[in-house]
Image: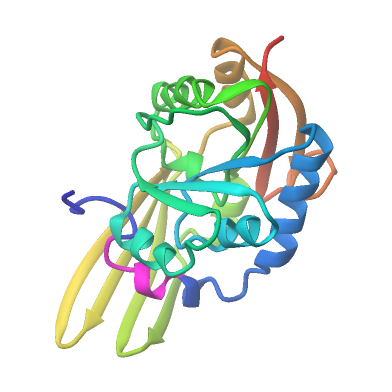
């Protein structure tokens, strides 16, 4: 599959290092609390936008059958090094993936939904997710907020060096169109490449409307992987949803 224009084609090898500050164990424990709180005897897990497979490996180690889907072949090459036991990976698009079985728990985190640039795109994902759910399934996902972008990303630049690879990460925000652009300049072995990520800031109201239109029920809306409601300083908004009954 041609990786041109696909996020995380160039920076996959450096991704885990760039996010080394993230406490994945604490994050995983929160995700599990949601799953175990809403799903009766869960066994199967589907992650959309699994990236380098850190969550998949943790679910597998705890005895769950987990499938991770991602659009970036290079990210999945990293995930493959963790795909043992009950953890499988698949190259596919969130809008069009096909699976034969229904999953007890489906999740998509770390602003993956913000890569859907229109509400039609969001609805396509939701409609597709429905085919992987049964009546007892839960779908957990997040969206990043304008507060997060304004305070921690807009006009910010970071530089990372790992294993002979230098990455410069710069961000800019188009407030009128609610578009955040992240540019990555990668230098390695005397070669320079560029990669750009474009994300859309969706409002909670837009997401609620899309969920309603696509036949989802919203159980909870949480702030920043807590059990508190979102406020004006929320960085990530978490939606806990199921199919309408």
Residue ID at (43%, 63%): 79
Q: Quadrant of residue 37?
A: top right
Q: Which residues are magenta?
A: 9-15
Residue ID at (32%, 67%): 184
Side (left or right) of 182 relative to 242: left
Q: Position of residue 224 (x, y in %)?
A: 73, 50
Residue ID at (53%, 71%): 19
Asked if residue 34 is among those painted magenta in the image, a careful observer would answer no
Question: In this view of the protein, can residue 232 be seen by the observer?
Answer: yes
Q: Quadrant of residue 239?
A: top right
Side (left or right) of 241 relative to 96: right
Q: Quadrant of residue 167?
A: bottom left
Q: Position of residue 35 (x, y in %)?
A: 74, 41
For the residue pair 31 and 190, the one nearer the viewer reads as 31
Q: Identify whether 88 is placed above or below 74.
A: above
Q: Position of residue 108 (x, y in %)?
A: 56, 43
Question: In this view of the protein, can residue 231 be seen by the observer?
Answer: no
Tell me the colour scheme of the image: rainbow
């Amino acid at each position: 599959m041609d990786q041109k224009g696909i996020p995380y084609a160039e920076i996959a090898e450096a991704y885990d290092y760039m996010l080394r500050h993230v406490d994945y164990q604490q994050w995983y424990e929160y995700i599990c609390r949601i799953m175990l709180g809403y799903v009766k005897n869960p066994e199967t897990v589907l992650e959309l936008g699994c990236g380098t497979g850190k969550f998949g490996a943790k679910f597998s180690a705890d005895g769950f059958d987990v499938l991770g889907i991602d659009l970036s072949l290079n990210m999945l090459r990293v995930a493959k090094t963790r795909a043992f036991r009950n953890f499988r990976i698949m190259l596919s698009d969130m809008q069009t993936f096909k699976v034969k079985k229904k999953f007890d728990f489906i999740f998509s985190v770390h602003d993956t939904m913000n890569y859907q640039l229109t509400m039609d795109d969001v609805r396509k994902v939701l409609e597709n997710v429905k085919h992987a759910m049964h009546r007892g399934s839960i779908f957990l996902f997040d969206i990043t907020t304008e507060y997060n972008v304004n305070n921690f990303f807009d006009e910010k630049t970071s530089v990372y060096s790992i294993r002979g690879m230098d990455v410069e990460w710069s961000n800019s925000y188009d407030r009128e169109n609610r578009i955040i652009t992240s540019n990555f300049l990668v230098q390695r072995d005397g070669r320079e490449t560029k990669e750009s990520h474009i994300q859309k800031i969706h409002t909670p109201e837009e997401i609620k409307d899309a969920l309603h239109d696509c036949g989802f029920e919203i159980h909870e809306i949480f702030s920043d992987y807590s059990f508190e409601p979102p406020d004006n300083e929320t960085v990530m908004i978490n939606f806990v949803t199921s199919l309408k009954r």
